[in-house]
Amino acid sequence: MTISATDFRMPVLGADMQAGTLVAWRKGAGDAVRRGEIIAEVDTEKGVIDVEAFHDGVLDEIVVPVGQKVPVGTVIARFRRDAGAEAAAEGVAARPAARPAQEPRTPVAGERPRAAAPAPDRLQRMRQTIAAAMARSKREIPHYYLATTIDLHRATAWLADVNAARPIETRLLPGVLLLKATALALRAVPELNAVWDQERVVLRDTVHVGVAISLRGGGLVILALHDTATRSLDDLMDGVRDLTARARAGRMKSSELADSTITVTSLGDRGVESVYGVIYPPQVAIVGFGTVLQRPWVVDGDVRPRPVVTVTLAADHRVSDGHRGGLFLEEVGRLLQEPEKLR
Amino acid sequence: MTDDPRAIILEVLGGIAPEADLAAVSPQTNLRRELDLDSVDFQNFLIGVAKRAGIDIPERDAAGLVTLAACEAYVRERG
């Protein structure tokens, strides 16, 4: 078996992150580590993040001790790994493919949250880093914007039907249908599922929709709902519940902060009719869903009340144009007319 | 019943809105608005209450459980 040493660097946990502080090593030198296992905890503006291993191996040496703050990209540990086991481990943001099975999880009573509400100084730093990322986005990315309104009566009726027979812990919320439809629609316009890297677009094969989650007390995070296009609605619902609960409690994982390939922002719960997002670099598109509203809708020449939602797209003109963006929104709307196929 | 419904409800809420001063929440206030709970938070809240109280909350009842008083009465009745 060939053994090779690998540097483990401070990961980039979102475009807005400059540095992180090591607050704990969960593994020690000489420990065997499995891909996806949590090896360290890093404090950032967003809270304390669980940093996962990118591959199987043995933790050889801890380079950065607890308490030290280092810029992203700094070598914080060294690994030994079976070189045949994996092709590449260069990308610090590479996602561990073998994730432990997702379990629906509500915050356990009595569990101590690590960063329930950002402290004022943390919140201020978070605002600064969000501002820096968004200013960069507006400066560098030539955005274009589109919107359309989608009839959700079939989706709403189908959901009500499915949910009627289910216990509360497996009930589906409308938002998860919208996420799945978004992920599947990217098959028609794959250039929206991509990152902009060194003056060129790099398409991503897998769709990891980043879900914008506002943090209690202010600020927000975008957490990857991994493999959005291929997971079942039930699995995605569990995933969204789990991400939301852990964002609230300040228990997020490095892969969730690093892996999104497109963002979805939904302000429906706040009663907002439509939201035009600012693209989160290095992504090239952001999709916005407003609240589901009852509106007069013309069906076969008659006006009828229908639940409708406004979906928007902000996308990068270096990568796509309004024609392709329009096809994407049309596809989202088409998929939502056949909700039973989104399962 | 093992626990007081109010204690169960406050404990679950405390896990979802850890920074909130739950003692200051009026029994008649809309919890979603008062504690800024989105639909996923609210579902997590109801799942937590259902689990801890050992009850199911059918879909038709869920939307009505918007205040502490309503939740408490509901759990007391079914628990």
Image (cartoon, coloured by chain):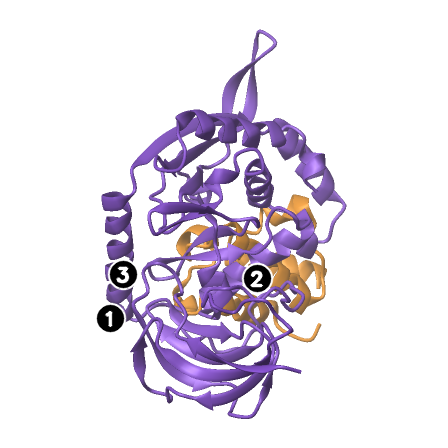
Chain colours: A purple, B orange
Question: Is disc 3 in the same subunit as disc 1?
Answer: yes
Q: Residue at x 49, y 44 (%)?
A: A193
Q: Amino acid at mark 2?
A: Asp
**Which residue has dot 2 on it?**
A242
The relative height of residue A306 versus residue B70 in the rendered view (above or below) is above
Closest to the observer: A53 or B50?
A: A53
Closest to the observer: B72 or A199?
A: A199
Q: Position of residue A12 (x, y in %)?
A: 39, 66
| Chain identity of mark 2 | A
Q: Quadrant of the N terminus of chain A?
A: bottom right
Q: Are marks 3 and 2 in contact (CB under 8 Å)?
A: no
Going from the N terminus, do you reach mark 3 or mark 1 first?
1
Q: Quadrant of the C terminus of chain A?
A: top right
Instruction: Classify 10 Å Cα crowding around label 1: few (below 14), some (14-19), many (20 and above).
Output: few
Going from the N terminus, do you reach mark 2 or mark 1 first?
1
**Which residue has dot 3 on it?**
A129
Q: Quadrant of residue A226?
A: bottom right
**Which residue has dot 1 on it?**
A121
| C-alpha span from label 3 to label 2 | 25 Å
Q: Is residue A1 left or right of residue A22?
A: right
| Chain identity of mark 3 | A
Q: Amino acid at mark 1?
A: Asp
Q: Quadrant of residue A128?
A: bottom left
| C-alpha span from label 3 to label 1 | 12 Å
Secondary structure type for disc 3: helix
Q: Amino acid at mark 3?
A: Thr
Q: Position of residue A340 (x, y in %)?
A: 71, 36
